[in-house]
Amino acid sequence: MKIKQSSIALKSLLFLSIVVTSCSQDSSQWIESIENDKITVDRVKKAYDIEIEYFSRTQNIEKQNLIEIINKDIDELEEQLKPVHQKFQKKNFYENYKNMLIMKNAAEKTGFASRPDIKEVLDYYQNQALSQLYLQEEVEKRIKITDEDARNECKRLREEDQRFAALTLEKCIMIGKGYLKQRISANIFDNVLSKIKEKLVYKSNDKFDLDEYLKNDTDLKSSIGKQDPKKEVKPPASEPEKKP
């Protein structure tokens, strides 16, 4: 099972940062607080569930398979799966979540989060995360895998790799379903993307020579590092200290 490593941390961080500000108030016990931002038991559980859902969707892994990786003894896992196991252990997840909130609050307190260039970066990655989640769901809607399909895939895996022969039939079928899902997703990706475009009003400017524009990339490369200077944004003024 292959895990996509590129920008997982960044996308997970951005996705959580989007939802963390919209968490409804809860009455569960609070654990720690950063400024006026309280980490509660329910809030940690909600964040954990979201990260499981997001990771499952963006990595194209069956949630059942992901949960099995998390619950398994780390010594029984392949090397490439061990970071996934460690990521979702309660202590590791909590520390990462807490550190994320510390950085988030620091960014807001110092005015970093209010900088126009940072807002543009966040907006870009929010759109990227949203499009990735939507596309993945549209792909999954079109995937139909029967029990027989999963059994046949299990049989194929056992013939090609002896490690699968050591698994129980139930576990082999479950993994086979995951492999099939990944393969089918790759095959139908372009078709799904075309179907999505058909739902929208999608036009090209006949007066613009796109082919000519794409031939020359010097305009993009020359602008790197030459954006408008960052405007300094002062942090929010602190409230005056009240004398007793």
Image (cartoon, rainbow, N blue to C red):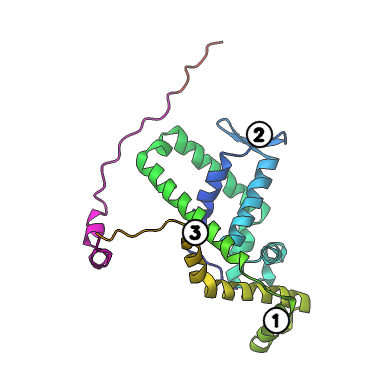
Image x and y of residue 168, in percent: 77, 78
Q: Which residue is mark 2?
A: 25
Q: Is residue 154 visible?
A: yes
Q: Is residue 54 above or below residue 228?
A: below
Is the magenta region chiefly helix, strand or loop?
loop
Image x and y of residue 16, in percent: 56, 48
Image x and y of residue 89, in percent: 66, 56
Q: Amino acid at mark 2?
A: Gln
Among numbered discs 3 and 1, the one appearing first in the sequence: 1
Question: Residue at (69%, 35%) from the top-left corner?
Answer: 26
Q: Which residue is mark 3?
A: 199
Q: Which residue is mark 1?
A: 154
Specify the farthest residue to the top.
244
Question: Residue at (68%, 69%) from the top-left corner?
Answer: 75
Which of the 4 image quarters holds residue 56?
Answer: bottom right
- Helix, strand or loop under label 2: loop
- Helix, strand or loop under label 1: helix
Q: Amino acid at mark 1?
A: Cys
